[in-house]
C-alpha cells in the first residue's frame, strides 16, 4: 500500500519503507521551514544587491552592465519559484523605498527600474523551470537562463521606452544589444555552477 502523504510504502503488510522528502531545488536541502525560507529570501535579495554594485557603464546607454542579473537568475534557480520571486520582490520594494542596493549604491526609481521589475517574473520563471529539472544539466541551464533573461527584457525594454520616450528600436539598441555578450558569459557560468552543485549533492 502506498501512502502518498507520508511518502511511505508498505510491503506485505509488515515492512514499511519511509522515503526521504522529494528535493526539487537546491534550497530544499537547507534544514528548517519558515525560518529557512525567510532567511533565504532575505539572503537572495542581499546577494542581488551586492552583485548590483559590480557595475560597468555602457556608453550611450542609461542602463549599466551589472552582476545583479546573474544573481537574480541564480537566486530563482536555487530557491524555487515562490522563494525566488519573493526574494526579488523584496529587492525591488526595499530598493524603491530607499535601501541603497541598486547599482552604484542607489535607490528609488531609476529609468532602469523595469529590469528590476523583470527580476520578479524571471525569478518565478527560472525557479519553476529549476523545480522541473531545468538546472540539472548544462544544456537545460542554458535554456532556463535564456528564458529568464527574456523575461527581464520583456519588462525592462517597455519600461525604458516609457521612462525615456525612446522608440522600440532605440530601446533595444541601448537596453538589450550591449548586454548580450555579458548575458552569454553569465549563462555559461551558471551552466557550470548549477549542475556542478547538484553533482556534489548527489555524491553526498
Image: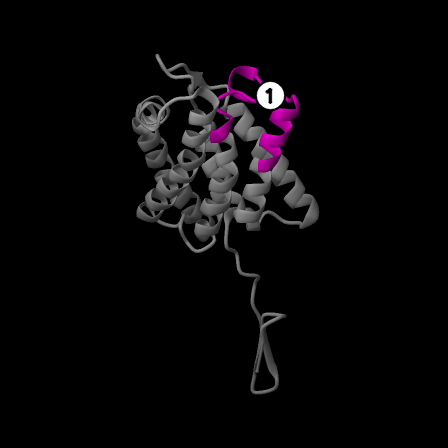
Task: Look at the image and say whether residue 61 sits in the magenta stretch.
Answer: no
Q: Please tell me whether mark 1 sits on a helix, a strand or a loop.
A: loop
Q: For the N terminus, give its image quadrant.
A: bottom right
* Residue 67 shows in the view: no
The number of numbered badges drawn on the structure is: 1
Residue at 53 percent of width and 29 percent of height = 48
Position of 189 relative to 171 (above/below): below
The residue under the point 59% across, 29% down is: 46
Which of the two residues, 192 or 178, is positioned nearer the viewer here?
A: 178
**Residue 55 in sight in this render:** yes
- Residue 153: image location, x then y, percent: 40, 34
The image shows residue 23, relative to residue 139, as above or below, that is below
Task: Name above or below for residue 2 compared with residue 186.
Answer: below
Start and end of the magenta stretch?
89-115
Say if the magenta span includes residue 110: yes
Instruction: Locate residue 86: give its quadrant.
Output: top right
Residue found at x 30% / y 47%: 139
Residue beneath disc 1: 108
Residue 53: x %, y % from top left: 50, 19
Q: Residue furthest bottom?
A: 12
| x then y, percent, for residue 192 | 36, 39
What crowding class fits label 1: few (fewer than 14 Cα within 10 Å), some (14-19), or many (20 or more)? some
Colour pattern of the rendering? one colour
Q: Where does residue 154 sit, x and y in percent of width and height?
A: 41, 37
- Residue furthest toward the right? 35
Which residue occupies the foreground of this view, 45 or 19? 45
Amino acid at each position: 500500500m502506498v501512502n502518498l502523504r507520508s511518502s511511505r510504502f508498505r510491503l506485505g503488510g509488515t515492512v514499511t519503507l519511509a522515503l526521504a522528502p522529494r528535493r526539487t531545488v537546491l534550497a530544499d536541502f537547507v534544514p528548517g521551514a519558515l525560518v529557512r525560507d525567510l532567511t533565504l529570501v532575505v539572503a537572495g535579495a542581499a546577494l542581488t544587491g551586492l552583485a548590483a554594485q559590480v557595475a560597468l557603464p555602457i556608453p550611450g546607454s542609461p542602463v549599466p552592465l551589472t552582476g545583479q542579473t546573474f544573481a537574480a537568475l541564480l537566486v530563482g534557480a536555487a530557491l524555487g519559484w515562490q522563494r525566488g520571486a519573493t526574494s526579488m520582490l523584496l529587492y525591488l520594494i526595499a530598493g524603491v523605498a530607499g535601501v541603497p542596493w541598486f547599482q552604484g549604491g542607489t535607490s528609488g526609481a531609476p529609468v532602469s527600474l523595469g529590469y528590476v521589475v523583470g527580476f520578479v517574473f524571471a525569478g518565478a520563471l527560472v525557479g519553476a523551470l529549476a523545480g522541473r529539472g531545468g538546472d540539472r544539466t548544462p544544456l537545460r541551464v542554458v535554456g532556463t537562463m535564456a528564458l529568464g533573461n527574456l523575461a527581464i527584457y520583456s519588462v525592462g525594454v517597455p519600461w525604458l521606452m516609457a521612462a525615456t520616450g525612446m522608440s522600440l528600436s532605440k530601446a533595444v539598441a541601448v537596453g538589450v544589444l550591449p548586454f548580450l555578450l555579458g548575458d552569454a558569459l553569465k549563462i555559461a557560468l551558471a551552466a557550470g555552477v548549477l549542475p556542478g552543485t547538484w553533482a556534489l549533492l548527489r555524491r553526498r
